[in-house]
Image (spheres, rainbow, N blue to C red):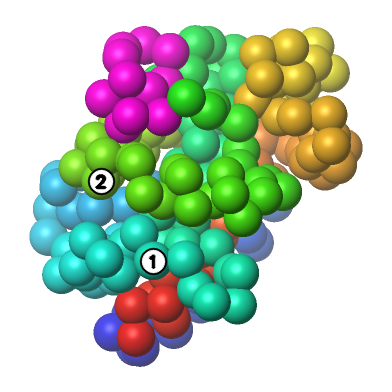
Amino acid sequence: MLEDRKLWNQRQKELKSMLAKPAQYENAREWLLLQHGAVHSARSRDGAAWSFEDEVLDHMTENRFRHVPASGANSVAWHIYHSTRIEDMTMNVLVAQMKQVIDSDLWMQSMHLNVRDTGNGMSLEQLVHLSSVVDIPSLRAYRAAVGQRTREIVMELSAADFRRKVSSAHLSQLSEMGDVLPENNWLLDYWSNLTVAGLFMMPATRHHFVHLNKSSRIRE
């Protein structure tokens, strides 16, 4: 609903202010979980709070989910894949220095995918292929697993962790694993300038909101 989206945007501004003040860490963590939960399915967390993901995707037809707009814009399938992969990369490798969710189970196999990068700069042929072959329930299950892992990471962070800058060694790891392709190294440059708090403000929350908005417009 429009009012829920407006409230989310207002809370995001307040969260940014909280994360800038170490004394407000406990409140910031609660708000972060609230904001993050809203851009993931309610089925991946406790409670019955509003879920933008469920609002956009739950009643979307398979044809609409896979549809590549005539303008050459990205499909809903791509938007969900792309934003989920970026959360998996940034939260697990750059924030927690641990194995990604996609590597912890046979997710690529179950999603019927042979790519693992961010999806930035895909050709039309690649976009159509991903949109047509991806297993939708598995993609959403992977997204839920990524979201749950992020929530676990949040609970382990201290106030000092939020001020920590991204490690160049972990940025390089994303290149070595093929998660960020050479032509998309601008992403690594962008993430290199962020703190952990900055990664939560964009890839883990705002980035999802942007792509769900785009998916909503495709649905409509």
Please give the name of the residue rendered at 66% of the width and 47% of the height, measured from the top-left corner: 122
Q: Give the answer, above or below, for where 59 lies relative to 178.
A: below
Q: Read off the residue under disc 2.
A: 136
Q: Nearer the viewer, residue 2 or 22?
A: 2
Horizontal side of 100 relative to 3 (left or right) equals: right
Q: Is residue 171 visible?
A: yes
Q: Nearer the viewer, residue 68 or 2?
A: 68
Q: Give the answer, above or below, for where 44 lies relative to 74.
A: above
| Quarter residue 26 falls in | top left
| Type of amino acid under label 1 | His
Horizontal side of 98 relative to 67 (left or right) equals: right
Q: Position of residue 152 (x, y in %)?
A: 36, 27
Q: Are marks 1 and 2 in contact (CB under 8 Å)?
A: no
Using a 10 Å C-alpha cutoff, classify the residue at mark 1 as few (fewer than 14 neighbours), some (14 to 19) or many (20 or more).
many
In the picture, the disc for residue 67 is 1
Q: Give the answer, above or below, for where 136 lies relative to 103.
A: below
Using a 10 Å C-alpha cutoff, classify the residue at mark 2 as few (fewer than 14 neighbours), some (14 to 19) or many (20 or more).
many
Q: Secondary structure at mark 1?
A: loop
Q: Position of residue 169 (x, y in %)?
A: 80, 11
* Residue 158 within the magenta-colored segment of the rendering: no
* Residue 103 within the magenta-colored segment of the rendering: yes
Magenta extent:
102-113
| Type of amino acid under label 2 | Ile
Q: Position of residue 43 (x, y in %)?
A: 14, 47
Please give the name of the residue rendered at 71% of the width and 29% of the height, measured from the top-left corner: 180
Distance between mark 1 and mark 2 Cα atoms: 13 Å
Q: Nearer the viewer, residue 181 or 6?
A: 181
Q: How many marks?
A: 2
